[in-house]
Protein backbone atom coordinates (compact mmCIF):
# COMPACT_ATOMS: atom_id res chain seq x y z
CA UNK A 1 0.00 0.00 0.00
CA UNK A 2 2.80 2.39 0.87
CA UNK A 3 4.39 1.80 -2.53
CA UNK A 4 1.23 2.86 -4.36
CA UNK A 5 0.90 5.96 -2.20
CA UNK A 6 4.50 6.95 -2.96
CA UNK A 7 4.00 6.23 -6.66
CA UNK A 8 0.83 8.35 -6.76
CA UNK A 9 2.52 11.23 -4.94
CA UNK A 10 5.50 11.07 -7.26
CA UNK A 11 3.25 11.04 -10.34
CA UNK A 12 1.41 14.12 -9.09
CA UNK A 13 4.69 15.86 -8.27
CA UNK A 14 6.08 15.11 -11.72
CA UNK A 15 2.89 16.39 -13.36
CA UNK A 16 3.12 19.65 -11.42
CA UNK A 17 6.83 19.92 -12.13
CA UNK A 18 6.33 19.24 -15.84
CA UNK A 19 3.58 21.85 -16.15
CA UNK A 20 5.68 24.38 -14.24
CA UNK A 21 8.55 23.80 -16.65
CA UNK A 22 6.19 24.12 -19.60
CA UNK A 23 4.82 27.48 -18.49
CA UNK A 24 8.26 28.82 -17.64
CA UNK A 25 9.85 27.82 -20.95
CA UNK A 26 6.87 28.87 -23.10
CA UNK A 27 7.00 32.36 -21.60
CA UNK A 28 10.77 32.41 -21.59
CA UNK A 29 11.08 34.03 -25.00
CA UNK A 30 9.27 37.15 -23.81
CA UNK A 31 11.10 37.46 -20.51
CA UNK A 32 14.61 36.30 -21.52
CA UNK A 33 16.09 39.80 -21.37
CA UNK A 34 15.04 40.25 -17.73
CA UNK A 35 14.84 36.66 -16.47
CA UNK A 36 17.46 34.96 -14.30
CA UNK A 37 19.62 32.29 -15.88
CA UNK A 38 18.00 28.95 -15.15
CA UNK A 39 14.76 27.38 -13.98
CA UNK A 40 15.66 24.24 -12.11
CA UNK A 41 14.70 23.34 -8.56
CA UNK A 42 17.69 22.79 -6.25
CA UNK A 43 18.62 19.27 -5.21
CA UNK A 44 17.18 19.79 -1.71
CA UNK A 45 13.70 20.25 -3.19
CA UNK A 46 13.94 17.60 -5.89
CA UNK A 47 14.93 15.01 -3.28
CA UNK A 48 11.71 15.81 -1.42
CA UNK A 49 9.69 15.65 -4.64
CA UNK A 50 11.15 12.24 -5.42
CA UNK A 51 9.43 10.56 -2.43
CA UNK A 52 12.25 8.03 -2.42
CA UNK A 53 12.07 7.40 -6.18
CA UNK A 54 15.30 9.26 -6.99
CA UNK A 55 16.11 7.18 -10.06
CA UNK A 56 12.72 7.80 -11.64
CA UNK A 57 12.88 11.56 -11.10
CA UNK A 58 16.45 11.75 -12.39
CA UNK A 59 15.34 9.93 -15.56
CA UNK A 60 12.51 12.42 -16.00
CA UNK A 61 14.76 15.46 -15.54
CA UNK A 62 17.36 14.02 -17.89
CA UNK A 63 14.69 13.60 -20.56
CA UNK A 64 13.62 17.21 -19.99
CA UNK A 65 17.20 18.40 -20.44
CA UNK A 66 17.69 16.37 -23.62
CA UNK A 67 14.39 17.67 -24.99
CA UNK A 68 15.41 21.25 -24.28
CA UNK A 69 18.82 20.96 -25.96
CA UNK A 70 17.36 18.99 -28.86
CA UNK A 71 14.66 21.63 -29.34
CA UNK A 72 17.29 24.36 -29.57
CA UNK A 73 19.20 22.33 -32.16
CA UNK A 74 16.15 21.50 -34.29
CA UNK A 75 14.91 25.10 -34.30
CA UNK A 76 18.38 26.37 -35.32
CA UNK A 77 18.41 28.59 -32.22
CA UNK A 78 21.84 29.13 -30.69
CA UNK A 79 22.29 28.28 -27.01
CA UNK A 80 22.58 31.43 -24.89
CA UNK A 81 24.53 31.77 -21.65
CA UNK A 82 21.44 31.24 -19.50
CA UNK A 83 20.61 28.12 -21.54
CA UNK A 84 23.99 26.63 -20.70
CA UNK A 85 23.50 27.56 -17.06
CA UNK A 86 20.21 25.68 -17.15
CA UNK A 87 21.94 22.61 -18.62
CA UNK A 88 24.72 22.77 -16.03
CA UNK A 89 22.34 23.09 -13.08
CA UNK A 90 20.02 20.42 -14.47
CA UNK A 91 22.85 17.90 -14.85
CA UNK A 92 24.03 18.78 -11.35
CA UNK A 93 20.60 18.05 -9.87
CA UNK A 94 20.19 14.87 -11.93
CA UNK A 95 23.51 13.48 -10.72
CA UNK A 96 22.70 14.50 -7.14
CA UNK A 97 19.52 12.44 -7.36
CA UNK A 98 21.23 9.45 -8.96
CA UNK A 99 25.04 9.71 -8.92
CA UNK A 100 25.35 6.29 -10.61
CA UNK A 101 23.37 7.35 -13.72
CA UNK A 102 26.03 7.38 -16.46
CA UNK A 103 24.28 9.34 -19.26
CA UNK A 104 24.28 12.78 -17.55
CA UNK A 105 28.05 12.59 -17.12
CA UNK A 106 28.49 11.79 -20.80
CA UNK A 107 26.23 14.71 -21.72
CA UNK A 108 28.15 17.04 -19.41
CA UNK A 109 31.38 16.17 -21.21
CA UNK A 110 29.93 16.40 -24.70
CA UNK A 111 27.95 19.61 -24.24
CA UNK A 112 29.48 21.62 -21.40
CA UNK A 113 33.14 20.96 -22.16
CA UNK A 114 32.99 21.03 -25.95
CA UNK A 115 29.96 23.00 -27.11
CA UNK A 116 29.64 25.49 -24.25
CA UNK A 117 33.40 25.75 -23.62
CA UNK A 118 32.74 25.34 -19.89
CA UNK A 119 35.29 22.66 -18.97
CA UNK A 120 35.38 23.66 -15.29
CA UNK A 121 31.63 23.03 -15.02
CA UNK A 122 31.97 19.72 -16.86
CA UNK A 123 34.77 18.67 -14.51
CA UNK A 124 32.68 19.65 -11.49
CA UNK A 125 30.01 17.14 -12.53
CA UNK A 126 32.52 14.51 -13.67
CA UNK A 127 34.25 14.54 -10.28
CA UNK A 128 30.97 13.30 -8.86
CA UNK A 129 31.16 10.42 -11.31
CA UNK A 130 34.73 9.66 -10.22
CA UNK A 131 33.54 9.51 -6.60
CA UNK A 132 30.47 7.31 -7.05
CA UNK A 133 31.42 5.27 -10.13
CA UNK A 134 34.94 4.69 -8.89
CA UNK A 135 35.36 1.64 -11.14
CA UNK A 136 34.63 3.59 -14.35
CA UNK A 137 37.82 4.73 -16.09
CA UNK A 138 36.01 7.13 -18.44
CA UNK A 139 35.37 9.88 -15.90
CA UNK A 140 38.95 10.47 -14.72
CA UNK A 141 39.87 10.17 -18.41
CA UNK A 142 37.45 12.97 -19.34
CA UNK A 143 38.65 15.21 -16.49
CA UNK A 144 42.24 14.59 -17.52
CA UNK A 145 41.54 15.48 -21.10
CA UNK A 146 39.58 18.63 -20.21
CA UNK A 147 42.42 19.72 -17.92
CA UNK A 148 44.92 19.22 -20.73
CA UNK A 149 43.05 20.39 -23.80
CA UNK A 150 40.89 23.23 -22.50
CA UNK A 151 42.58 24.37 -19.28
CA UNK A 152 46.27 23.72 -20.09
CA UNK A 153 46.69 22.23 -16.61
CA UNK A 154 49.11 19.47 -17.59
CA UNK A 155 49.92 18.28 -14.07
CA UNK A 156 46.25 17.68 -13.23
CA UNK A 157 45.71 16.11 -16.64
CA UNK A 158 48.53 13.61 -16.14
CA UNK A 159 47.27 12.73 -12.65
CA UNK A 160 43.74 11.91 -13.81
CA UNK A 161 44.85 10.06 -16.93
CA UNK A 162 47.17 7.89 -14.84
CA UNK A 163 44.28 7.26 -12.44
CA UNK A 164 42.10 6.19 -15.37
CA UNK A 165 44.82 3.88 -16.71
CA UNK A 166 44.76 1.82 -13.49
CA UNK A 167 41.02 1.07 -13.65
CA UNK A 168 39.62 -2.12 -15.21
CA UNK A 169 38.74 -1.95 -18.90
CA UNK A 170 40.85 1.13 -19.65
CA UNK A 171 42.60 1.20 -23.05
CA UNK A 172 46.26 0.25 -23.13
CA UNK A 173 47.31 3.60 -24.59
CA UNK A 174 46.34 5.42 -21.38
CA UNK A 175 49.41 3.99 -19.67
CA UNK A 176 51.68 6.07 -21.92
CA UNK A 177 49.25 8.94 -22.52
CA UNK A 178 49.53 10.09 -18.91
CA UNK A 179 53.24 10.70 -19.35
CA UNK A 180 52.68 12.30 -22.75
CA UNK A 181 50.20 14.81 -21.34
CA UNK A 182 52.85 16.09 -18.96
CA UNK A 183 54.55 17.58 -22.03
CA UNK A 184 52.70 20.01 -24.29
CA UNK A 185 52.61 18.68 -27.83
CA UNK A 186 50.47 16.92 -30.43
CA UNK A 187 47.33 18.63 -29.17
CA UNK A 188 45.15 17.85 -32.18
CA UNK A 189 46.23 14.21 -32.26
CA UNK A 190 45.47 13.85 -28.56
CA UNK A 191 42.01 15.33 -29.11
CA UNK A 192 41.45 12.96 -32.03
CA UNK A 193 42.23 9.96 -29.87
CA UNK A 194 39.91 11.22 -27.17
CA UNK A 195 36.99 11.93 -29.50
CA UNK A 196 37.16 8.52 -31.15
CA UNK A 197 36.98 6.89 -27.73
CA UNK A 198 34.09 9.08 -26.60
CA UNK A 199 32.15 8.47 -29.82
CA UNK A 200 32.52 4.73 -29.28
CA UNK A 201 31.11 5.10 -25.76
CA UNK A 202 28.12 7.32 -26.68
CA UNK A 203 24.65 6.17 -27.78
CA UNK A 204 22.71 9.46 -27.53
CA UNK A 205 21.98 10.62 -31.13
CA UNK A 206 22.33 14.39 -30.57
CA UNK A 207 25.65 13.99 -28.81
CA UNK A 208 26.91 11.51 -31.43
CA UNK A 209 26.12 13.99 -34.23
CA UNK A 210 28.04 16.78 -32.51
CA UNK A 211 30.98 14.54 -31.67
CA UNK A 212 31.14 13.14 -35.22
CA UNK A 213 31.21 16.68 -36.63
CA UNK A 214 34.01 17.71 -34.29
CA UNK A 215 35.90 14.51 -35.09
CA UNK A 216 35.71 15.32 -38.81
CA UNK A 217 37.08 18.81 -38.13
CA UNK A 218 39.96 17.52 -36.03
CA UNK A 219 40.82 14.87 -38.61
CA UNK A 220 41.19 17.70 -41.11
CA UNK A 221 43.46 19.62 -38.72
CA UNK A 222 45.63 16.56 -38.10
CA UNK A 223 45.87 15.86 -41.84
CA UNK A 224 47.13 19.41 -42.44
CA UNK A 225 49.55 19.31 -39.51
CA UNK A 226 51.06 16.02 -40.73
CA UNK A 227 51.49 17.53 -44.21
CA UNK A 228 53.20 20.54 -42.62
CA UNK A 229 55.60 18.21 -40.80
CA UNK A 230 56.50 16.46 -44.06
CA UNK A 231 56.95 19.80 -45.84
CA UNK A 232 59.23 21.11 -43.09
CA UNK A 233 61.24 17.87 -42.96
CA UNK A 234 61.89 17.91 -46.72
CA UNK A 235 62.39 21.65 -47.26
CA UNK A 236 63.74 22.86 -43.94
CA UNK A 237 61.11 25.58 -43.61
CA UNK A 238 57.38 26.07 -43.26
CA UNK A 239 55.24 27.07 -46.27
CA UNK A 240 54.18 30.70 -46.59
CA UNK A 241 50.55 29.65 -46.84
CA UNK A 242 48.59 26.42 -46.48
CA UNK A 243 47.72 26.37 -50.18
CA UNK A 244 51.40 25.60 -50.86
CA UNK A 245 50.85 22.14 -49.37
CA UNK A 246 48.44 21.30 -52.19
CA UNK A 247 50.55 22.99 -54.87
CA UNK A 248 53.64 21.03 -53.79
CA UNK A 249 51.79 17.72 -53.59
CA UNK A 250 51.84 17.27 -49.82
CA UNK A 251 48.03 17.32 -49.81
CA UNK A 252 45.75 16.22 -52.65
CA UNK A 253 43.08 18.69 -51.54
CA UNK A 254 42.69 20.99 -48.57
CA UNK A 255 40.37 19.34 -45.99
CA UNK A 256 37.10 21.15 -45.41
CA UNK A 257 36.15 22.44 -41.99
CA UNK A 258 32.60 21.08 -41.41
CA UNK A 259 31.88 24.16 -39.29
CA UNK A 260 32.45 26.39 -42.31
CA UNK A 261 35.68 28.04 -41.18
CA UNK A 262 38.89 28.74 -43.07
CA UNK A 263 42.19 27.11 -42.13
CA UNK A 264 44.94 29.49 -40.99
CA UNK A 265 48.65 28.73 -40.51
CA UNK A 266 49.90 30.41 -37.33
CA UNK A 267 53.48 31.55 -36.76
CA UNK A 268 53.93 28.73 -34.24
CA UNK A 269 53.35 26.23 -37.05
CA UNK A 270 50.01 25.10 -35.67
CA UNK A 271 46.79 25.06 -37.68
CA UNK A 272 43.84 27.20 -36.63
CA UNK A 273 40.31 27.40 -38.05
CA UNK A 274 38.36 30.65 -38.06
CA UNK A 275 35.29 28.67 -36.97
CA UNK A 276 37.03 27.68 -33.71
CA UNK A 277 35.22 24.35 -34.27
CA UNK A 278 31.93 25.87 -33.11
CA UNK A 279 28.60 25.77 -34.92
CA UNK A 280 27.39 29.05 -36.35
CA UNK A 281 24.55 31.05 -34.85
CA UNK A 282 22.17 29.41 -37.32
CA UNK A 283 23.14 26.02 -35.95
CA UNK A 284 24.71 24.81 -39.23
Image (cartoon, rainbow, N blue to C red):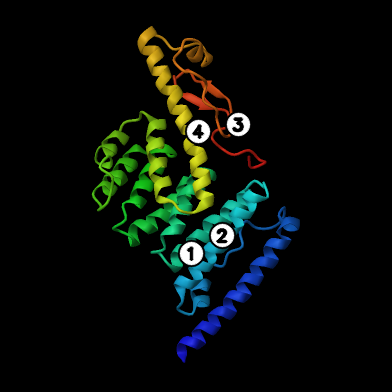
Badge 1: residue crowd in 10 Å (few <14, some 14–19, many ≥20): many
Mark closest to the chain's N terminus, 3 or 2? 2
Distance CA(mark 2)–CA(mark 1): 10 Å
- Position above or below: 6 against 44: below
Position of residue 45 measured from the top left corner of the image (x, y, whole percent): 53, 73
Position of residue 223 measured from the top left corner of the image (x, y, whole percent): 44, 25
Q: SS of the residue at dot 2?
A: helix
Badge 2: residue crowd in 10 Å (few <14, some 14–19, many ≥20): many
Disc number placed over residue 65 in the picture, else none: 2
Disc number placed over residue 217 in the picture, else none: 4
Q: Quadrant of residue 66?
A: bottom right
Asked whether, in this view, residue 279 is left or right of residue 189, the answer is right
Q: Which residue is mark 3?
A: 260
Asked whether, in this view, residue 194 is left or right of residue 216, the answer is left
Asked whether, in this view, residue 148 is left or right of residue 174, the answer is right
Q: Quadrant of residue 180?
A: top left
Mark closest to the chain's N terminus, 2 or 1? 2
Q: SS of the residue at dot 4?
A: helix
User: Mark 3 or 2, which is nearer the eye?
Assistant: 3
Distance CA(mark 3)–CA(mark 4): 10 Å
User: Mark 1 or 4, which is nearer the eye?
Assistant: 4
Position of residue 64 measured from the top left corner of the image (x, y, whole percent): 57, 63
Amino acid sequence: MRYWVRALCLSLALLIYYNLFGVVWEDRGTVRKNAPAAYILPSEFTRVLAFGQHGLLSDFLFLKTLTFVGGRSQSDEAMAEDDWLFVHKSLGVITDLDPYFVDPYMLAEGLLAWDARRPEEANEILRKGVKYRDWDWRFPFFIGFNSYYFLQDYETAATYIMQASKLPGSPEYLKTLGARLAYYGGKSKTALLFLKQMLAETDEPLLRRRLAMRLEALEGAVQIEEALDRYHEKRGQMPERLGDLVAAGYLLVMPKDPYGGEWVLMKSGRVFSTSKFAESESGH
